[in-house]
Structure formats: structure tokens, C-alpha cells
Image (tube, grey):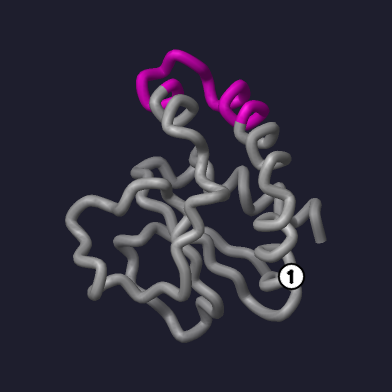
Amino acid sequence: MIQCKRVYDPANKNDGYRVLIDRLWPRGIRKEALVFDEWCKAVAPSAELRKALHSETIDFAAFQHQYQEELKKAPQEVARLAQKAQEGTLTLLYAARDTTQNHALVLADYLRQAL
């Protein structure tokens, strides 16, 4: 099972393996305060792509396509995270405010296809 959760939401015993998937550390959170198992920057969108989405230079559909292309360049990390999801619950942690259009949702779908 793969789920997405904001880093600002409390940890839950059902979260399983918790992976921070942002390239930058989330604002307002001390490193020792965040409950997570790993920080996987390798599957985060590139800075250029993230900035293009936030500045609305590209729409979410274009972001999604370009991000999936970036993920193809990290097959080992994708396979490893997909394996974690097969073993139990995988929670992808992200800091974005938008809970309906963000990179965690794109990554979760990508990982589900890799299973």
C-alpha cells in the first residue's frame, strides 16, 4: 500500500515506512521532530521543474509528464521504494500545500505502476 501525507500531519502507527520525498527540508520542522525512516532526494523533482510548477510556468499535466521522465532516470530508487510498498505500507511525505496536485501523488502512481 502506498499513501501520501503532508509532513505537517502527525505520524500514525499505520504509516509503515515513512519516506520524505522533497529535495529541500520542509520549513518550520526541526529534523529531530519529524518522524521518518529516510529522506530520498533522488526521487524528488528537480529544482527547475519544481520552480516551474510553483511559478505556474507549466501546468500540472506538463509537470506530471516531465516528472515521470525524471523518475525514469532513477530506476534503482523507484524499484527500491516499490519493493518497500510490496513489503508493507509506504508513506510518501511531502511539504506542498496543495493536497490534490503535487509530486507525491505523481510518484505514488508511478510506484504503483512499477509494482
At x 35%, y 75%, the residue is: 35
In magenta segment, residue 56:
yes
Q: How many marks?
A: 1
Secondary structure at badge 1 equals helix
Q: Position of residue 40 (x, y in %)?
A: 50, 58
Q: Quadrant of residue 111?
A: bottom right
Q: Residue furthest top?
A: 57
Question: What range is drawn magenta here?
Answer: 52-66
Say if 44 sits above or below 92 in the image.
above
In magenta segment, residue 60:
yes
Say if 52 sits above or below 47 in the image.
above
Please tell me which residue lies in front, 64 or 37. Answer: 37
- The residue where tag 1 is placed is 83
Q: Position of residue 39 (x, y in %)?
A: 45, 62
At x 74%, y 60%, the residue is: 79
Q: In this image, 47 relative to 112: left or right?
A: left
Q: In this image, 9 relative to 53: left or right?
A: left
Category of crowding for the residue at label 1, using alpha-carbon neighbours closer than 10 angstroms: few (below 14), some (14–19), many (at least 20): some
Q: Position of residue 100 (x, y in %)?
A: 50, 42
Q: Quadrant of residue 60?
A: top right
At x 49%, y 65%, the residue is: 19
Q: Classify the position of the N terminus by image quarter.
A: bottom right
Q: Amino acid at mark 1?
A: Gln
At x 61%, y 34%, the residue is: 67
Q: Residue furthest bottom?
A: 13
Please tell me which residue lies in front, 31 or 97. Answer: 31
Please tell me which residue lies in front, 30 or 97. Answer: 30
**Dominant SS type (magenta):** helix
